[in-house]
Image: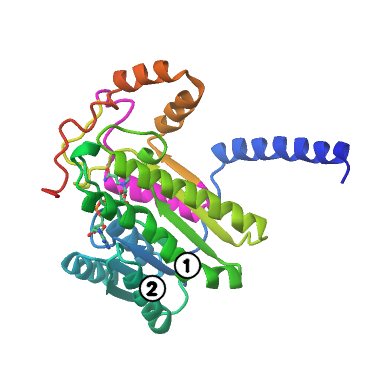
């Protein structure tokens, strides 16, 4: 295609997509049917993972639940059955271990079938200054929060590519879009998760696999216990999010094939500011909005070292 035609095509498509997204702001997109899908949720034993599992269960999906916490997993399994899941399969899996992921993934393929919606949700946080973070916790954070995404994709993506059908969901964080003091390993892992998810989305597009959808989720603090004690100075701008609200937003994003979801909406604005302003000006804003003091009162889910 010559330069003139290509420029004309790109200009036309650019305005078409802008208009399309404006229309979808007013007219909600159709939500896809997920009954009959095989949905794997890592970290399904509590918090957002449990809520997502129950929501897919109530929509008639088969749910495959992974967690390292056997008790929490059992409880989610029971609730998912009650909620009407087509089938419920629970597996204890340590997502910090590649071999464990591959072993359990093989078991899932044999016992349940090919996973069609993969939700990488398991996550942990150290919550200390970098110099106070023990090497073992830094490594664990990277293994659970990002390396596990590589290994689960290696295990389940080939079948999605072969059938040109599937959905890859990455529960990252707003801390994957902006660095935060006392969260260096967490931010590094979540930036990794965002970069990985975006790259795979482009690979699917480049391969013509438009049936394999992707969603990356970047929420601010959620009231699940993981970030207990933390709060931003300006609650109106950055409120602590309720888990039910976040899970419902994630479900809508998945069912509408939305590529990125940041919560609350102010995160889009703050990230745009960060990229437009000089660093010193952006840091002043980070202090003003309380991002720099966010972790001061961090308690989390108990002692980790
Ligand atoms: N809570 C927040 O403020 C917040 C904000 C942004 C993003 N997130 C992300 O959302 C996701 C869910 O977090 P949550 O708030 O529901 O926390 P949560 O602690 O309630 O849930 C995390 C789950 O992951 C499981 N898990 C931990 N290590 C594991 C391992 N090695 N193998 C398998 N499972 C393991 C835990 O047992 C737990 O059930 C995480 O990825 C988290 O980073 C949370």
Q: In the figure, residue 178 lies in which quadrant? A: top left
Residue beneath the point at 42% across and 65% down: 152
**Residue 135 image position (x, y, % from top left):** 23, 49
Q: Is residue 271 above or below residue 245?
A: above
Residue 90 seen in the figure: yes
Q: In the image shown, does 47 or 108 lie closer to the viewer?
A: 108
State the residue at coordinates (38%, 78%): 108
Front-most of residues 32 and 297: 297
Q: Residue at x 48, y 51 (%)?
A: 196
Q: Which residues are magenta?
A: 233-259
Magenta run includes residue 248: yes
> Which residue is denoted by mark 2 in the rendering?
102
Q: Residue 250: image x %, image y %?
A: 40, 50
Spot the residue most to the left: 303
Q: Are marks 2 and 1 in contact (CB under 8 Å)?
A: yes
Q: Disc 2 to disc 1, how far (Cα)?
A: 9 Å
Q: Which mark is residue 154?
A: 1
């Amino acid at each position: 295609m010559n330069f003139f035609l290509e420029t004309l095509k790109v200009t036309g498509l650019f305005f078409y997509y802008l208009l399309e997204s404006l229309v979808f702001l007013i007219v909600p997109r159709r939500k896809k049917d997920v009954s009959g899908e095989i949905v794997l949720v890592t970290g399904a034993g509590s918090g957002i993972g449990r809520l997502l599992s129950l929501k897919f269960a109530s929509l008639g999906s088969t749910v495959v639940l992974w967690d390292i916490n056997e008790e929490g997993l059992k409880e989610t399994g029971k609730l998912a059955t009650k909620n009407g899941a087509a089938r419920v399969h629970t597996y204890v899996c340590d997502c910090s271990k590649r071999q464990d992921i591959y072993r359990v993934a093989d078991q899932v393929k044999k016992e349940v079938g090919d996973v069609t919606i993969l939700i990488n949700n398991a996550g942990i946080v150290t919550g200390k200054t970098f110099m106070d973070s023990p090497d073992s916790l830094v490594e664990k954070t990277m293994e659970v929060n990002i390396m596990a995404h590589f290994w689960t994709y290696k295990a389940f993506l080939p079948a999605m590519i072969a059938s040109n059908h599937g959905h890859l969901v990455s529960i990252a964080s707003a801390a994957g879009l902006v660095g935060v003091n006392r969260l260096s390993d967490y931010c590094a892992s979540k930036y990794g998760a965002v970069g990985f998810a975006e790259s795979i989305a482009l690979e699917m597009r480049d391969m013509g696999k438009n049936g394999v959808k992707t969603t990356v989720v970047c929420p601010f603090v959620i009231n699940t216990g993981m970030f207990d004690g933390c709060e931003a100075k300006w609650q109106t701008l950055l409120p602590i999010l309720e888990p039910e609200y976040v899970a419902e937003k994630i479900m809508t994003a998945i069912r509408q094939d939305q590529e990125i979801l940041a919560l609350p909406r102010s995160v889009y604005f703050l990230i745009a500011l960060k990229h437009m302003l000089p660093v010193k000006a952006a840091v002043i804003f980070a202090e003003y909005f309380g991002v720099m003091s966010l972790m001061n009162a961090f308690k989390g889910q108990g002692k980790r070292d």
